[in-house]
Amino acid sequence: MSLNELITDGKRQMQVCNACRYCEGYCAVWRAIEWRRTFTENDMAYLANLCHDCKECVFACPFTTPHEFGIHPPKLFSGLREELYKKYSWPSGLAKAIGNKGGFWIIAIVAFLLIVAIVAGTNGLPTLLEQHAGKGSFYRVLSEAFLEVTFGALGIWFIGGWMIGAVRFWRDIRSTTPERVQGVDIRKAITYALRLRYLGDEETEEPFSGHRKWLHHSVFYGFLLDVASTTLAAVYAHIFHIQAPYPFYHPVVILGTLGGIGIIIGTSGLIYIKSRSNDANSNKNAKRSGNAFSISLLTIAVTGMLVLICRDTAPMGIILALHLSSVASLFFTAPYTKFVHFIYRFLALVQYAQEERLAESHLTPKVRKENSNPYRGKFANRG
Amino acid sequence: MAENDTHHYDILVIGGGNAALAAALQAQESGAKVLIIERAPQFYRGGNSRHTRDFRIMHAYENDYMMGAYTEDEFMEDLRRVAGGEIDESLAHLIITKSAELPKWLSNQGIRWQPPLSGTLHLARTNMFMLGGGRAMMNAYYRTASARKINIWYESLVEDLVIEGNQFTAAQVRKGNKQIIVHAKAVVLASGGFEANIAWLKKYWGDAADNFVIRGTPYNQGNMIQILLKYGAEPIGEPDAFHAVAVDGRAPKFDGGIVTRLDSVPFGIVVNREGKRFYDEGEDFWPKRYAIWGGLIARQPGQVAYSIIDSKALSKFMPSVFDPIVADSLDELADRLGLPSSQLQSTVQAFNHSVHQGTFDPSTLDDCYTEGITPPKSHWAVQIDEAPYYAYPLRAGITFTYLGVRINNKANIQFNNRQVDNMFAAGEMVAGNVLRRGYLAGFGLTMGAVLGRIAGEEAANVIK
């Protein structure tokens, strides 16, 4: 379905959901729906990115297919997100070209060939296949300056790309909210995001669905550890002038290793769960781009771990080139792949936190009582 | 599975909703080997339970899911009020006291709850809401049943029961093209009412039944009630009575569930297809209004009515699943609806002239009323004069029927001609035991789960 068709069907579905409201206890999406009577294109963009795709609501829905109403919000929203990522990214032509399919691989291969060519042109091809050890061994394959300039430029590229998308999306979803966002809204949104508050973790009718939350945490916090490791490495290299590689007990290596393990476990689990999920319950494009992103992170984590394991052996040069080309591809494609989801989700959560604050200011304190995990509440006694 | 297969179980449960699963799980807790036979395919399992929302629960203290306290006396008083004078006090008392056990027991079956939110606030003190509603509840029930090795047959119809002397011995089941005999030491019947059986409804309502909307499952055909009555079970409940609400006339014939409800009635006027008003639209608040308008519409010509409002009223009620029919003038609106234009205009004119201006407040029985017209509109009467005008077609949405079989306090089915110790019933097919008529939100599920558990426990007891 095209973006327009998805939005038209979305408005129809939202009207059914808003007349039902049985799902209101599940997640932020449902309360956001209740705060509206009509649904604009921008509302649909907001709701689509508020949904974390846990599908608890679908298995609770008496009106999903085969019922004639054919309600399926998570599938609708994931289809919408795919189209919206393209719509908001810049340049959108590039997004369409490399966004969901094999973009990451094509760029990774190109990057690998470039790296090999550059090594051949500078240090000579044999350096790629020789054994290097000791301080600065990585830089004997590719010079430190080259790496810093290349990855610095890529950093500016993807962060710039992300920001363009973020500004466009933010403008759209804010178009009807005159009140200003407050610090407390942002703080709340950060808490929601860091805890994945609105990704349901109960077992639905799909196998292993209850594990998605911790697996995602594993990827996300693993990624943060790797970012921390890289940052720390930069501090050591430029401030303390201690060059990589570092010994195994070094904080840079420990953080990087933990992060790598987290990513490997998390992405493998997420890919496995996706492979077991019923196609009827997910948007085909979203499933593909989600898997592509998981696989790209998995590739980086695995090659990164191999660099560590093989760093004193001859294959290190090739493995390093593979690792760096996959990282370069991740960075280059970052504004166009599933990687962008965290930006849109987070901005939607900020908008939600504000709407929640405004709505709750009309309610009594008693009603505001929250219970994030009702199942394990007072009555549950499994002993 | 071979043709003409024969199966042996300790306890057979016929039906697949809340009462049936409560019975099956309770019986299994005593170690019985249980089979559930559900007529519907897996997606539609659970009968009307898949459209439910909440349990009415007696509780002494506030908890995470219910505010304040709801005492036994108050619960009983609420039941008496809706019962219209006829109530089985001893059974009602049993259900009320046992309702207090339900939150814990149901939680142990995997059912989750939601804290009071905007859509449930008006019942937050008396009722407990399942997270995600009825289908989520049924999913939890079935997941637990499967985990405990209870066998479940979908798309299977019990065509007859074998009662030898004073004992139930077997059920004759059609599963696809196969005829199967299921022998069991006891049976629990919990397969709902007959509200989806249009031919049966026609016995009391004639051709009008063709115009009814059935809000729930099309599988509630009442065949088990029919079979039980054939074997001499004592009928109970008013045969021609049903609970019906006003639903959007464009709703699907079956299974439109909650989304077709429409609460626009008090915000304007309601006319029949002749363009005339026929009942006080401002008589009372939601629970009573909700319970009577289906029946009122069922008695109008063509079993149809039209809720007419103007643009002032449009955003004052829960959004509807279908867009209203809109027109810039009443004449045009009448045309769109196929109503006699001059009659509609004079009805609105007469109504507008009779409105006594007051302070409009939908949360109280306010002082906006009419003077000098019949029927009056006692509250919330505001002139219909701001174009564009909106209309919703309304029909009678049948929720459930009251006719069932008599049981005793052990959920044991009572027969006219014999005493059968190993047959039990629960759920909507015995709802008439407590209330001959009337409706109390959330009581159906409570009654189903309590009597289902009793039926399951007693069935397990008689086979020991």
Image (cartoon, coloured by chain):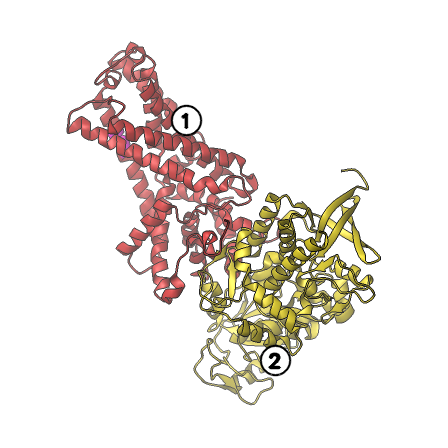
Is residue A378 in sight in this rendering? Answer: yes
How many marks the image carries: the answer is 2
Q: Secondary structure at mark 2?
A: loop
Of residue A214 and residue A102, the one placed in the foreground of this image is: A214
Q: Which shade of the palette goes to chain B? A: yellow
Of residue B128 and residue A291, the one placed in the foreground of this image is: B128
Q: Which shade of the palette goes to chain A? A: red
The extreme front residue here reads B464
Kind of residue sitting beneath label 2 = Tyr
The quarter holding residue B274 reads bottom right
Above or below B85: residue A246:
above
Of residue B228 and residue B458, the one placed in the foreground of this image is: B458
Residue wearing tag 2: B279
Residue wearing tag 1: A105
Q: Chain of mark 1?
A: A
Above or below A310: residue A229:
below
Above or below B148: residue B412:
below
Q: Residue at x 56, y 70 (%)?
A: B391
Is residue B261 in sight in this rendering? Answer: no
Q: Is residue A154 magenta?
A: yes
